[in-house]
Amino acid sequence: MKRALAIMVALCTIGFAGFSQINIKGSWTATMCILPAIDLTSSLSLTYNVAGFNLTSVTGFSNPGVVSQRFALSGVFGPFTITGDMWFAATVPEYMASRLVTAFDFGGINIGLKVLHWDTDYNANMFTSTSVFPYNRPFREFPILVASPCAQTDSFGMMYILTAGVAPINVRASFVDCCTGTSLYDLYLWLNKIPLCCGIEYTAEVHFLKTKGFDYISFTGINVPLCCGVSFDVTITYGVDYKDLSITPKFAGIIDACFTVWGDAVFTEYVWTGIEIWGFKIRCTIADCNYIEFINAFNVSLVNAYYLATPDKFRTACGEYELVKIGFCGAGCCGGKYDVTLRIFFGDLGGIFDITRFTFTANVPIMTNFTLTLSGTMYASADTACIGTGSSLCIGWTFSF
């Protein structure tokens, strides 16, 4: 009995020592919303390092259970950098797509290879969708490829993308296989930042398609300055049976550490007639990371689209046009920092003082590897269209190990 107990103790000791040598890191992030309804979302990320490679598993959870699964690989093999991903639809369950990317730099020449493979049932999500969770357009890093090269009636699709570059020339050739054999899909050639004159540079882009041969040649990046921060961008495109000239006015605005003006130059039939002001921002820094910010929009749709991050965007349903944003931070637990951001929105459908809603977010480190997050929204408006689903309150955390 004593011998058996001694063996068990030895095995446990060896097992614990061996497990402690396994280099596994990870994080658990979760958000639980109490209002307007109870909802829980979470993700678990585990990374295992072996032979210089990081193997990562990212699992997404929601109310039904596991909703997404991704495996990732990254590392260096000799002169090659290698990254890879594989996505699964967890609720079906079903394989969705995978990607392998490798590249190396030899004597100033950059050479890369990207291999994409996907189930054509997910064509839209792979290539065009930017908001579908959990797919989130895995191939969106290839902005030129905006649609799937395979039909949904095909079983699987595979694409090989070869890239090569030596300043100022870059080339990209794509080959596709929709279960019928590999063939050329398209070819791009770029000449980057070619000097024209007077400090003006341009980029030339030539595109060929297998189905039509020469597609177009385009000259972009031509910026012609006028004065007072006003300039215009010129883009010229020559196709087989067309020519397109695009002139886009630009207004740099008045920008310094505290004051920013958003707007645009106004042209009428290529005649500069004035400057249109869309809005402005005033930011006053009080201390290290303590500040107060005032944002006022005269053209809400354009300010929302081009200048504001998602938490700062105005709700058109509330007629919002003004925001006061206050941020402050301080020393937290274990050498970390807490930070709090408060936002007060004003609009035409607001309550007292035209206040429409009040939002807050706070990140508070509780331990070295544990951070608590609080966020919420409270409405001062009585308009039902503005309030929508009502106030919200969410509690979240990130635990790293």
Image (spheres, rainbow, N blue to C red):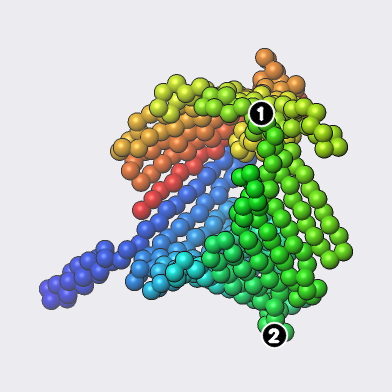
Kindly give the residue lying farthest to the left in the view shown. 2
Look at the image and tell me whether residue 73 can be seen.
no
Residue visible at 69% across and 61% down?
205
Compute the Cα span from label 1 to label 2.
Answer: 57 Å
Judging by the rendered image, the residue that carries numbered circle 2 is 181
Mark 1 element type: loop
- Which quarter of the picture shows residue 269? top right
- Using the image as rendered, state which of residue 372 and residue 228 is in the foreground: 228
Judge left or right: residue 60 versus residue 364.
right
Give the residue type at disc 1: Cys
Q: Is residue 5 above or below residue 389?
A: below
Q: Quadrant of the N terminus?
A: bottom left
Residue 204, image x, y percentages? 68, 59
- Amino acid type for the residue under numbered disc 2: Gly
State the mark number for residue 228.
1
Q: Position of residue 303 (x, y in %)?
A: 69, 33
